[in-house]
Image (cartoon, helix red, strand yellow):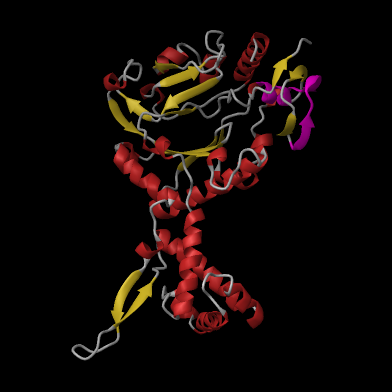
Amino acid sequence: MNERTREYLRGRFGDHYRRVSIEPPPRANEREWGYIPFSEGGTRMVRHRAWIDLVGGADDLADALADDSVRPRHVYYSAGSYDDPGANSMGQKGWRGSDLVFDLDADHLPGVDPEEATYAEMLATCKDALLRLLDILESDFGFTDTDVVFSGGRGYHVHVRREDVQALDRSARGEIAAYVRGAEVEFEDLIRTEAVGGEAGRKSPAEKRTLPPDGGWSGRLHAELLEFVDEVAGLDDEAAIERLREFENVGAKKAEGALRAMRNNRDAIADGNVDVHPAFFSVARTLLEDELASAGAPIDEPVTTDINRLIRLPGSLHGGSGLEVKPLDRAELADFDPLDDAVPETFRDNEIRITVTEAGPVELLGEAFTMQEGEQRVTEARGVFLMARGRAEKAPE
């Protein structure tokens, strides 16, 4: 990024902050603040700032960010609260507690190849992961009052600010992160085995394996299994057998037995019984082991475990895209399009001249097209996006 581009973005970011109002997080004066300025290189962090150091006498946080002495490229605040947030070392700050934060990055998701997937495709996949994360947090932990934020770049942040999570140490946060990811959940660990039948002193009892239908990963997988049972049982015989034979080591005879068991024992399966037929158990195990591999939320675990983490400020601009770090209501998520809804109004109406240095696709404001190298006139939002991402420089007007 050359000097002209830096100064242009710095000025327009300042213009944006003068037009908006930003609500600070709870206990703003107990948090550490930091930012990255529009300096050469663009990676030098100014941190260990207290609220008063950043805001001073400004009436609004956005006014402080618009001030000529700041106008940052990126803005952060700490998940942690401190006695002295402006102290220059973590040991001197006096930790009081931390929000529980979850971070999802589109280019770090399983099955996503950043070289092959478009930016919009990666963000869509990331939103699916976000919905899985919110379901796990709500149903398994009771975290219903969460703050959801589009990061302005590659994904989403979820903040849990309840008082009962503030004092959790790194180890406890690590256990929550591992559970959410599903990384350490094994199918066999979810199965309960109990003795049934037989008479004492005469023969050994048989064993019945159950997948409990209520709660946690067991309940989540049981719901997937029951949906599969209803789907297959509703097919005609030929199609159902063909579907079951897709599973490893399930031939025609086993498929017939599994199908018969599924149709005749639906109520037992709904109660959690997965031992209605050996072939059915084999199918269930394969199905649910595959489901476990994709049903978790692939969060960035170090973000959750770090009690001193700095996280992007909702309402600020992301210096790597020019998009807003946008707080979202849960009701907005289904229809939220980050490449349209997070484009600031400040950049929507003007046209500017840029020199494209990296040709390629651009998806923004509901349109997808290919940019060619060279000087051209574009909507300011697209120009800011390309310049922020290092794909263009500001051309003279």
Residue 142 appears in the figure: no
Position of 397 with respect to 48 (left or right) is right
Q: Is residue 126 above or below residue 373?
A: below
In this rendering, position of residue 208 left or right of residue 384? left
Rendered position, 78 above or below 182? above
Percent coordinates x, y for residue 275 in the rendering: 41, 78
Q: Quadrant of the C terminus?
A: top right
Residue 366 position within the rendered picture, expressed as x and y whole percent measured from the top left: 74, 37
Residue 244: x, y in percent? 57, 74
Res. 316 visible in picture = yes
- The tally of labels here is 0
The image quarter in which residue 315 lies = top right
Q: Which residues are magenta?
A: 366-387
Q: Residue at x 62, y 48 (%)?
A: 334
Which quadrant would the N terminus be assigned to in this image? top right
What residue sits 27% from the left and 88% below the top? 198
Whether residue 335 is situated above or below residue 238 in the rendered picture:
above
In depth, the one of 365 and 282 nearer the eye is: 282
Q: Which residue occupies the foreground of this view, 314 or 387?
A: 387
Does residue 357 sit above or below 261 in this rendering? above
- Say if the magenta span includes residue 217: no
Q: Nearer the viewer, residue 210 or 92?
A: 210
Q: Is residue 380 magenta?
A: yes
